[in-house]
Structures are given as structure tokens and as C-alpha cells.
Image (cartoon, rainbow, N blue to C red):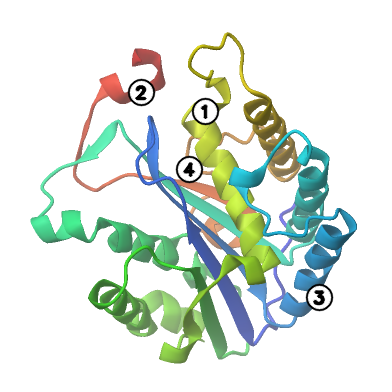
Amino acid sequence: MLSPEMPVSEKELVLFCDESVSDGAYSSNFYGGLLVGGSQIHAVTQRLASVKAAQNILAEAKWQRVTDNYLGKYISLMDAFFDEVSAGRVKVRIMFRQNARKPTGLTQMQVEQSFFILYYQFIKHAFGFAFMPAHSGPVRLRAYFDQFPDTGEQVARFKGYILGLNASTAFQKARLSIAPEDLTEVRSHEHPLLQCLDIVLGSMAFRLNDLHNAIPAGQRKRGKRTIAKDKLYKHILGRVRALHPNFNIGITTGGGLEGTWSKPYRHWAFVPSDHDYDKSLTKGQK
């Protein structure tokens, strides 16, 4: 099927970003983002908020809050979210690192700053801004981040790197710009879009780290919550495969570099430029 395209007439794009599992059994450093046009954000947000209200999801919707009792409610919310993705009003990107590909030659600074270095790479490349179709421009980019685990100097340095993208070939080609006031940390409970991103991101980290097979200590079977999460993951996967038949969650989505912009939903298995491959860290070896 043809990928739905976000209208190129948008004068403002809004980027929501979140991060999840930093140290999983098989995959780590999960980052998620979604892009929505400025002219669409209010309507999309209201649609998701209305579904939450109709399903009596009064608190913040989160992957960690998925239970057997709430499974049907969360499926309804995910259907509403993926309806927006399918219509081309929202683009979703997920990035993660496979543990078997261990980076080599890192400096101490790179190790200490790895969280923000990977975040920067995600924002710079995952949405393929350089491949935006021709438009009249300029286009303003606003970025909302779920609250960072770090504060102070590291966050300020990270924001400086993001602002440096204004001088990049990709941003200049796309006639895209981002201002200091447009880099904002937000509380996810105030943003239904960020809540939906948390659920999708959490579901992928859950499956890629085989948590769907987890059995509590002293038990013989999976718990009800694990089963509910597995069912929700499978439903989400079904919605993704409606857009990308035979979609494989564990590898970078095909479609070439142009697909980084055009695909409505995409995964990026980040591979360090210098790395060793440790087969003992793959699923078949544990």
C-alpha cells in the first residue's frame, strides 16, 4: 500500500520524544518520537483525549499501567492513535540498539554522555528531514521531550547540539528551523500523544527483550499482566503490519533513505560505526 504523506504545506511541525529501557537483556537504549503537523495537533490531541474519556482512562495512559482489566481500553486508544498514523497525520519512529553490537573505541566522555549522544542521533536522522518534499517554507520545528533523567549542564549541552542542527545540510535543505524556546521538557500526563508514544515504545522494548515470556519466581505460568501486555503488543504489531506487511520489529525498516521521511511508521536498529559483534548476547545464546 502507498504510505500516507504528511501535507507539505505545514508551516510548523511538532516533535514529541520519549525514551525507555536503557539496559535490556537483548536490546537497549530505546528512543521514540512522533511528528505531527502544527495544523493537526489540536484535532489529533482532542480525538485521543476523547477516546481516553470514553474508555474511562482517567489517569495517564502508560505501558507500565497495562493490565488485564484495562486491555480493551488500551486497545481502543491504540486503534485511535494508529488511525491517525494511517491517515498520515502522525509519523512514528522507534530507535534501539542491539546489545550484541557492542561499541568500541569510545572515550570516557562519550560513555558518560551516551544517553544524549544517541538522543541527538535519533532526532537528526530518524525522521529523514532532508527528504521532505519540496515546499514553500520556512518550517518551524517544535520539540517536546518527556522530562529528562538528567538536569543542568548535560541537558544544556544537549539542547545546544539540537540547535546546531539549524546549520546542518538536512535542516537547510528542508528549510527547517528550531529556536531555543521550542525545545521544551513536558509532563507526559498533559499530552495524550506522548502517552500513546510511551505505550508503543514500551511494547517494542517488551517484545524485543522477550519479556512476554517472563514467569514470576515460584510460578509455572505467566502472570495476567504479562499476558495482557503481550496481547496489546500483538494488536499494535497488527496495526503496524497493516501499513508495512511482514514488518520485522528487530531490524531497520526498509525503504531506503527516502523512507526515513515517507514511511508512516519506522524502526531504526542503531549500529555504532565501530563495534564488535558478541553472539553470546543474542537471543539464541541465552
How crowded pointer 1 is (Cα within 10 Å; few <14, some 14-19, many 20+) is rated as some
Q: Distance between the residues labelled 3 and 4?
A: 31 Å
Q: Residue 43 carries which label?
A: 3
Q: Which of marks 3 and 1 is nearer the N terminus?
A: 3
Residue at the spot x=80%, y=49% of the render? 79
Badge 3 amino acid: Ala
Q: Residue 211 carries which label?
A: 1
Find residue 107 and report its horizontal and vertical position in percent.
9, 55
Badge 1 amino acid: Leu
Find residue 267 and report its horizontal and vertical position in percent.
52, 47
Q: Residue 249 carries which label?
A: none
Residue at the spot x=43%, y=66% of the render? 123
- Residue under circle 2? 282
The local secondary structure at tag 4 comes to: loop
60 or 285, which lies in front? 60
How crowded pointer 3 is (Cα within 10 Å; few <14, some 14-19, many 20+) is rated as few
How crowded pointer 4 is (Cα within 10 Å; few <14, some 14-19, many 20+) is rated as some
Mark 4 or 1: in front is 1
Badge 4 amino acid: Thr
246 shown above or below 34 = above
Residue 205 seen anywhere in this rendered image of the structure:
yes
Residue at the spot x=26%, y=77% of the render? 157
